[in-house]
């Protein structure tokens, strides 16, 4: 069975066609600059294998339907076709916000589309893109089943005392203001992978998952259920990120309005786009930060220390929330590739049972699962590559009554 996974951004579209018989990626691609004067598709057939073939297309795409139409041509009838339209059993969409309604992957119906639209107020930057993908797929693959896999779903088990903010309760009832959390597909995937690696049923596996990519978040998973996560109503809360501040004093808006005359929109832009690593040292990519540190840039060093201190702070908090933890799991771009970040984030956690082994942490082969804690560490530390597309495909396939 072949599942097409779609992940739409406001001007981009990522796809993967996955063969669920062996989890192989048959093709993958990225369409960028949708709606601009010139767009681009980079399509890879059989990526990462010796049969890999890369095709690029540069032409304008007026909308997501136009871009997906061109991608569909490459997948099913282009120069390196890997499927016919009839081969595609279902399409799985990444949808960011499912509110409180969706805690499971869900087959898309007109009612589900309406509910996703209703949640646009909670994710104004993200849900409209997901809807554009659904619309495009409906037009181009009529009759093919489609599923929505929500970023928020894995966090649906967080208890009320952890998801509520200490503000008037009526605001939760009226507007749904609460912690939702994001990156749930990734947290759920690596937590399940951990249970397989350590040979425990998922229902008995407890862990702290640390997703450090462009966006960064953590989750506390107790006996296979998420009980806390660092992102909140929006993906701005929690850890320090590339350009997002993460946790700040909530009176910052009023303070900046009073002292600098900033509008709400200006503070929002400042916290989302001008803060985080970029706000401290001007750089938002961790690789650039390491290069700058090596040249003696003190602000880059400070940004790294702040980033790791916040991760450490949350690991401590989640160990307390879990009351028993099998492992801390690092994943995503930075989590999988950056031994310095992992070392600084764990280096003083020995007293709470998390002991990192420096040689293992710096020595293992990237892209693979690795245990990087000492043999006597009560809580293990793992690096587990995430695979959100495979998780979306697996959840979509499960809705068809298979895998
Ligand atoms: P996204 O959240 O967009 O899926 P990724 O998980 O791909 O992002 O992570 C992207 C981030 O990973 C980049 O900002 C970069 O800082 C970081 N990264 C990627 N490779 C490395 C590396 N070798 N060392 C340190 N950081 C890396």
Image (cartoon, rainbow, N blue to C red):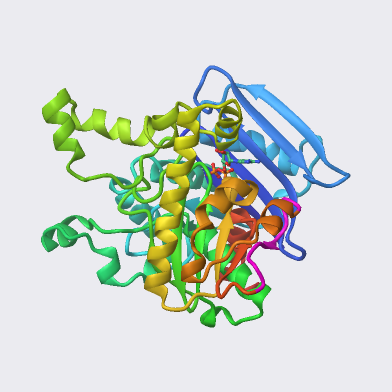
Range shown magenta: 365-375
Tell me if residue 153 comes above or below residue 30 in the rendering.
below
User: Which one is in front, 262 or 132?
Assistant: 262
Residue 92 lies, in percent from the top left, at 56, 56
The count of marks equals 0
Residue 307 lies, in percent from the top left, at 45, 44
Tell me if residue 198 comes above or below residue 269 in the rendering.
below
Note whether residue 142 is visible. no
Inspect the magenta stretch and tell me whether residue 225 lies in it. no
Residue 395 lies, in percent from the top left, at 57, 65
Q: Residue furthest top?
A: 37
- Quadrant position of the C terminus in the picture: bottom right
Q: Main secondary structure of the magenta part?
A: loop
Indicate the quadrant where residue 260 lies: top left
Residue drawn 70% across the image and 37% down it: 73
Note whether residue 26 is visible. yes
User: Which one is in front, 135 or 329?
Assistant: 329
Indicate the quadrant where residue 186 lies: bottom right
- Quadrant position of the N terminus in the picture: bottom right
Residue drawn 30% across the image and 52% down it: 233
Tell me if residue 165 comes above or below residue 194 in the rendering.
above
Residue drawn 63% across the image and 51% down it: 336
Residue drawn 61% across the image and 36% down it: 69
> In the displayed structure, does residue 256 sit left or right of residue 125?
left
């Amino acid at each position: 069975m072949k599942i097409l996974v779609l992940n739409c951004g406001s001007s981009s579209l990522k796809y993967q066609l996955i063969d669920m018989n062996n989890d192989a990626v048959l093709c993958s691609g990225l369409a960028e600059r949708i709606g601009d004067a010139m767009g681009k598709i980079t399509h890879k057939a059989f990526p990462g294998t010796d049969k890999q073939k890369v095709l690029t297309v540069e032409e304008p795409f007026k909308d997501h339907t136009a871009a997906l139409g061109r991608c569909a041509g490459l997948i099913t009838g282009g120069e390196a076709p890997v499927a016919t339209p009839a081969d595609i059993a279902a399409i799985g969409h990444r949808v960011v916000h499912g509110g409180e309604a969706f805690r499971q992957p869900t087959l898309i119906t007109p009612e589900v589309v309406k509910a996703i639209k209703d949640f646009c107020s909670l994710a104004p930057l993200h849900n409209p893109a997901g809807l554009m993908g659904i619309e495009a797929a409906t037009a181009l693959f009529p009759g093919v089943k489609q599923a929505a896999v929500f970023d928020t779903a894995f966090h649906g088990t967080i208890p009320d005392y952890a998801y509520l903010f200490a503000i008037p309760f009526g605001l939760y009832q009226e507007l749904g203001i609460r912690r939702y959390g994001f990156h749930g597909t990734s947290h759920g995937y690596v937590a399940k992978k951990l249970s397989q690696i350590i040979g425990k049923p998922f229902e008995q596996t407890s862990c702290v998952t640390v997703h450090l990519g462009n966006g960064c978040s953590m989750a506390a998973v107790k006996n296979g259920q998420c009980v806390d996560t660092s992102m909140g109503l929006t993906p701005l809360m929690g850890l320090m990120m590339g350009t997002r501040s993460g946790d700040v004093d909530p009176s910052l808006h009023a303070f900046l309005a009073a002292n600098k005359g900033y509008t709400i929109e200006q503070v929002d832009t400042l916290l989302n786009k001008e803060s985080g690593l970029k706000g401290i040292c001007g750089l938002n990519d961790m690789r650039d930060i390491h290069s700058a540190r090596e040249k003696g840039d003190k602000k880059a060093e400070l940004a790294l220390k702040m980033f790791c201190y916040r991760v450490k702070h949350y690991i401590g908090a989640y160990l307390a929330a879990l009351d028993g933890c099998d492992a801390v799991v690092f994943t995503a771009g930075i989590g999988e590739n950056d031994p310095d970040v992992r070392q600084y984030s764990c280096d003083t956690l020995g007293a709470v049972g998390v002991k990192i082994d420096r040689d293992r942490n710096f020595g293992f082969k990237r892209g693979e699962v690795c245990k990087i804690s000492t043999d006597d560490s009560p809580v293990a530390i793992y690096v587990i590559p995430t695979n959100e597309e495979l998780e979306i495909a697996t959840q979509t396939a499960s809705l068809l009554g298979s895998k």
